[in-house]
């Protein structure tokens, strides 16, 4: 499944980051790398963006970007 499909208040682990070039680099620069755990905090009322916690940082991520991140449920 992708990070976009993860449920609120769940913890997931990154399996793969899809995409290429600058977009993939930007996601990795935020600290989202293979094997890292992500806690899905909440989703905005209209569904975009998704608020997550990665490496003790809170990050808001667009759903289109979250759809590029393959995760597994912990």
Image (cartoon, grey):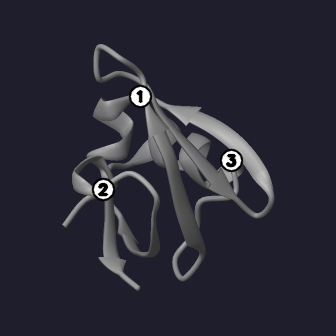
Give the answer, above or below, for where 5 lies relative to 50.
below
Estimate the x, y position of residue 54 in percent, counting from the top left: 67, 58
Q: Earlier in the sequence, mark 1 or mark 2?
A: 2
- Look at mark 2 in the image and give the residue it sits on: 7
Question: How far apart are the two marked residues, 2 and 3, measured between alpha carbons?
Answer: 21 Å
Residue 37, how many percent across, how many down?
Answer: 57, 74
Q: Nearer the viewer, residue 67 or 12?
A: 12
Quadrant including the C terminus? bottom left
Label for residue 62? Answer: 1
Question: Helix or strand or loop: what does disc 3 sit on?
Answer: loop
| Mark 1–mark 3 CB contact (< 8 Å) | no
Residue 28 falls in image quadrant: bottom right
Is residue 45 toward the left or the right of residue 31 in the image? Answer: left
Residue nearer the viewer, 21 or 41: 41
Q: Residue at x 47, y 48 (%)?
A: 24
Q: Secondary structure at mark 1?
A: loop
Q: Mark 2: which secondary structure?
A: loop
Say which of marks 2 and 3 sits in front: 2
Q: In the rendering, at what x and y percent does residue 39 appear? A: 55, 61
Q: Nearer the viewer, mark 1 or mark 2?
A: 2
For the residues marked 1 and 3, what is the alpha-carbon distance in whole angstroms?
13 Å
Going from N to C along the chain, the mark reached first, 1 or 3, is: 3
**Which quarter of the figure is the N terminus placed in?**
bottom left
**What's the residue at 38%, 51% (across, down)?**
8
- Report crowding for label 2: few under 14, some 14 to 19, many 20 or more residues within 10 A (C-alpha): some
Q: Give the alpha-carbon distance from disc 1 to disc 2, as whole Å.
A: 15 Å
Q: Residues within 10 Å of mark 1 (few under 14, many from 20)?
A: some
Which numbered circle lies on residue 30? Answer: 3
């Amino acid at each position: 499944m992708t990070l976009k499909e993860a449920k609120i208040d769940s913890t997931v682990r990154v399996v793969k980051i899809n995409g290429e070039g600058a977009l993939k680099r930007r996601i990795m620069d935020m600290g989202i790398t293979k094997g890292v755990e992500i806690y899905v905090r909440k989703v905005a009322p209209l569904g975009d963006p998704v608020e997550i916690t990665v490496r003790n940082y809170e990050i808001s991520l667009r759903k289109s970007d979250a759809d590029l991140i393959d995760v597994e449920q912990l």
